[in-house]
Image (spheres, rainbow, N blue to C red):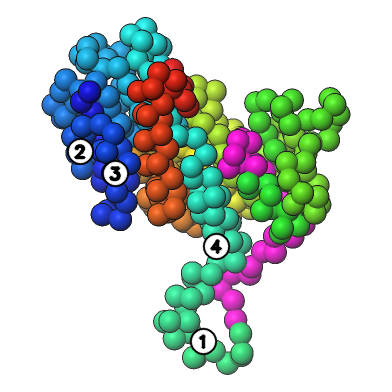
Amino acid sequence: MKAVYLEEGAVSRGDISLEPITSIVETKVFDNTTEDDKFEHIGDAEAVFTNKVIFDEKTFERLPNLKYVGVCATGYNVIDLDAARKRGIVVTNVPAYSTESVAQLAWGFILECAGHISSHNESVHNGDWIKSETFCYWLTPAMELAGKTLGIVGYGNIGRRMAEIAAAFKMNVKIYTAHPEKYIKDGTAGAERTSDALSDASSMSFVSLEELLSESDIISLHCPMTKDTDKMINAGSISKMKDGCILINVSRGGLVDEDALAAALKSGKLAAAAVDVVSAEPMKEDNPLLTAPNIIITPHIGWASVEARTRLISTIADNFKAFLNGSPVNVVS
């Protein structure tokens, strides 16, 4: 069987080996693949390992040899699953490999937005503390997290980890998920604790999206990109948020109407935002967030710790071994 790995450059800068994959199948490895060269790169391969390359109906039509698509990520919205099923092509993904890393970045964003650490560090290095007449000063007052409300949109692995960490900060937690019944015990209104750590939380409850928007001091997005979640953060939903709310997005850029977010930051409706994802990646020169105030933007690095990428490659290999053995796992098609 011939295989191709289409985007090695997205998973390794020489610090992660693809050997777990290449040791089990003849694999042609490309640093990057675009829409212009994807058919040339894939050729007559029967197995493809991919991240962001689009596999739609027309793509599958031109790849009659294809039997397996290993998505090198948790999200698989770039794959037309109906088209894959129709052709008997198995599609797998890698769930939960980056939970700790993504939650860590989200909390790094929250702590930066609440404490303004980097701007004060820059101020000190610019000599402002040396010139100060008092022993301390602040450019913008810090916000204490204890007692504040964190709204978590989406309650998968990362959303649950966010709630656990919020408990350590003694925050109130409000959760919006499409299927709250999965987490509610005995039909009661109270949320089932997902960990002993949550017992220290001031409160935790599943609520409507409207209640979450109106009562949260910080809102963090942790849901997949679907037709229902496309631009769920827009001018209308932002208008329901508290004045001075902070928005965090480490999920998918398409969840946010970027023009509306930029306008809310410029008007002061939102105090700050931090995003690791944007609607089109790599980021476009005319993205309105680039000129918005009080926003932190990182280049989709939440998943990219060495530990997470090592787990990713290991699971990709395990998925493919299971497929070759006739008992595929992590199948999304």
C-alpha span from label 1 to label 2: 52 Å
Disc 1 crowd, CA 10 A, few/some/many (<14, 14-19, 20+):
some
Q: Quadrant of residue 151?
A: top right
* Residue under numbered circle 2: 29
**Residues in magenta?**
137-160
2 or 3: tag closer to the N-terminus: 3
> At x 49% / y 45%, what residue is drawn?
98
4 or 2: tag closer to the N-terminus: 2
Q: Main secondary structure of the magenta part?
A: loop
**Residue 70 higher or lower than 108, as above or below:** above
Of residues 152 and 80, the one drawn nearer to the viewer in this rendering: 80
Of residues 270 and 330, the one drawn nearer to the viewer in this rendering: 330
Whether label 4 touches label 2, CB < 8 Å: no
Of residues 163 and 48, the one drawn nearer to the viewer in this rendering: 48
Disc 4 crowd, CA 10 A, few/some/many (<14, 14-19, 20+):
some
Whether label 2 touches label 3, CB < 8 Å: yes
Mark identifier at residue 181: none
Q: Secondary structure at mark 1?
A: helix
> At x 45% / y 34%, what residue is drawn?
94
1 or 4: tag closer to the N-terminus: 4
C-alpha span from label 4 to label 3: 35 Å
Tell me, yes or no, if residue 81 can be seen here: yes
What amino acid does circle 3 point to? Leu
> At x 21% / y 32%, what residue is drawn?
26
Report x, y in % for residue 11: 32, 46
Instruction: Please state which of the two labelled residues, at mark 1 or mark 2, is closer to the viewer.
Output: 2
Whether label 3 touches label 1, CB < 8 Å: no
Mark identifier at residue 129: 1
Mark identifier at residue 112: 4
4 or 3: tag closer to the N-terminus: 3
Mark identifier at residue 18: 3
Quarter of the image where the C terminus is located: top left
